[in-house]
Image (cartoon, helix red, strand yellow):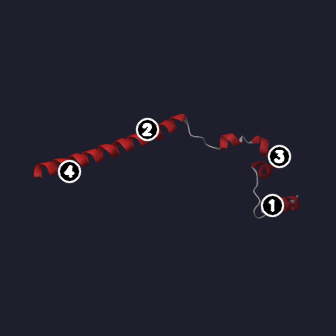
């Protein structure tokens, strides 16, 4: 049994070899649902990301406009 594990370990440690989950887990691979292991963004988190991006853009534009109006009012008052 130890020889089997050593042989398998050497196969998996071969440089440049990519090991699939099925190769790594062997006959137990069918017990694991690989799709559940990979997290996927939920629609609500995608919406929130878009919402936050829009809010950040709005804040940037409003701040820039406020700065422009301040500069314009100062130059009008001085000139």
**Residue 9's mark?**
1
The reply to whether callout 4 and callout 2 are in contact (CB within 8 Å) is no
Q: CA distance from mark 2 to mark 3?
A: 45 Å
Q: Nearer the viewer, residue 7 or 43?
A: 43
Residue drawn at x 38%, y 43% as measured from the top left: 57
If you read the primary sequence from the N terminus, does the residue marked by circle 2 or circle 3 appear first?
A: 3
Image quarter of the N terminus:
bottom right
Q: Nearer the viewer, residue 27 or 53?
A: 53
The reply to whether callout 3 and callout 4 are in contact (CB within 8 Å) is no
Q: CA distance from mark 3 to mark 1?
A: 16 Å
Asked which secondary structure carries label 3, the reply is helix
If you read the primary sequence from the N terminus, does the residue marked by circle 3 or circle 4 appear first?
A: 3
If you read the primary sequence from the N terminus, does the residue marked by circle 4 or circle 2 appear first?
A: 2
Q: Position of residue 9 (x, y in %)?
A: 81, 60
Q: Depth-wise, is mark 2 or mark 3 nearer the camera?
A: 2
Q: Position of residue 30 (x, y in %)?
A: 78, 41
Q: CA distance from mark 4 to mark 1?
A: 70 Å
Q: Is residue 6 left or right of residue 38?
A: right
Label 3 packing within 10 angstroms: few (<14), some (14-19), many (20+): few
Q: Is residue 13 left or right of residue 72?
A: right
Q: From what the image shows, is residue 17 above or below residue 58? A: below
Pointer 4 residue: 71
Label 1 packing within 10 angstroms: few (<14), some (14-19), many (20+): few
Q: Depth-wise, is mark 4 or mark 1 nearer the camera?
A: 4
Q: CA distance from mark 3 to mark 4?
A: 72 Å
């Amino acid at each position: 049994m130890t020889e089997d594990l050593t042989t398998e370990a050497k196969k998996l440690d071969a440089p440049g070899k990519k090991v699939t989950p099925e190769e790594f887990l062997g006959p137990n691979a069918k017990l694991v649902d690989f799709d559940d292991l990979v997290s996927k963004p939920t629609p609500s988190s995608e919406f929130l990301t878009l919402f936050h991006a829009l809010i950040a853009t709005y804040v940037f534009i409003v701040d820039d406009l406020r700065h422009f109006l301040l500069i314009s009012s100062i130059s009008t008052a001085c000139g």
